[in-house]
Image: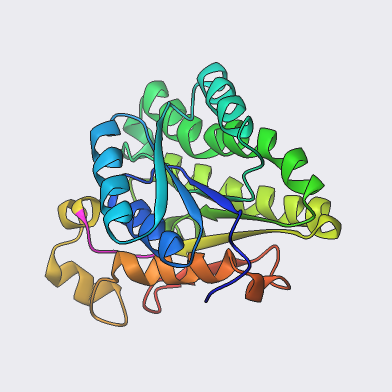
Amino acid sequence: MKDNTSLRRALVTGGSGDIGGAICRRLAADGLHVIVHANANAARAEQLVARILDEGGRAEAVAFDVADAAASQAAIEALLRAGPVQVVVNNAGVHDDAPMAGMSRQQWHRVIDVSLHGFFNVTQPLLLPMARTRWGRVVSVSSVAAVIGNRGQVNYAAAKSALHGATRSLAREMASRGITANVVAPGVIEGAMAAAQFPPETIRQVVPAGRAGKPEDVAALVAFLCSDAAGYVNGQVIGVNGGMG
């Protein structure tokens, strides 16, 4: 999937996690200069950058809280001083699960702050510089929970579902500038988060494929959507879920 990527930079929020790390490595392998974002795991982001460099890719790390508007603005302005960021993958998200009847206001707000307000805080300042290049890709990582629902995740499903409507609208706004906006909605994916929630017997019951997906499965779709080949794919929500929904 080699494209005209020689000058393209890609910012991946939540890039230090399992799925984010796979996305960063795949985009770097495809020739993009990858900006690996972290919040609390800055050291892990630096380790991933070192791995990408060892593999012959180009990468750097950045750390800020996407839910903090001022911190996000300062970090994005610093990145833009080196030129436009033409690819942004909004992968940052947090879980704080509870049945809604017992959910605290703090649980509700923190999850929505990161996934939804973080999407705005990161993406909005990148759009006009991106539009001036007449090429751009915005990919947001959602969840099957936003498509079919999941007990204990009303806050998470609400935040991720909101990205679907925002993305479809953004696609209409930016399509004439050569910018696409799409959503990837993973199901049960191997990693620390899934291991705690989905034991093997549960996976066999809820996933038609009978197994968890791999972070690389998500990364492959994200990489396609970030490529020149996906220029006519816009405003879509695409599942990577083994047939769950």
Q: What x and y, as percent, mark residue 129?
A: 74, 40
Residue at 68% across, 47% down? 166
How many marks do you count on the picture? 0
Residue range of the region highlighted in magenta in the rendering: 187-191
Q: What x and y, as percent, mark residue 225?
A: 58, 67
Nearer to me, 148 or 63 = 63
Q: Is residue 171 left or right of residue 8?
A: right
67 shown above or below 83: above
Nearer to me, 191 or 109 = 191
Residue at 31% across, 64% down? 215
Pick out the residue farthest to the right. 176
Q: Quadrant of residue 44?
A: top left
Nearer to me, 139 or 37 = 37
Residue at 49% across, 34% down? 112
Pick out the residue farthest to the top. 70
Q: What x and y, as percent, mark residue 168?
A: 71, 56
Q: Is residue 41 left or right of residue 94?
A: left
Q: Is residue 211 visible?
A: yes
Q: Quadrant of residue 104?
A: top left
Q: Is residue 144 visible?
A: no
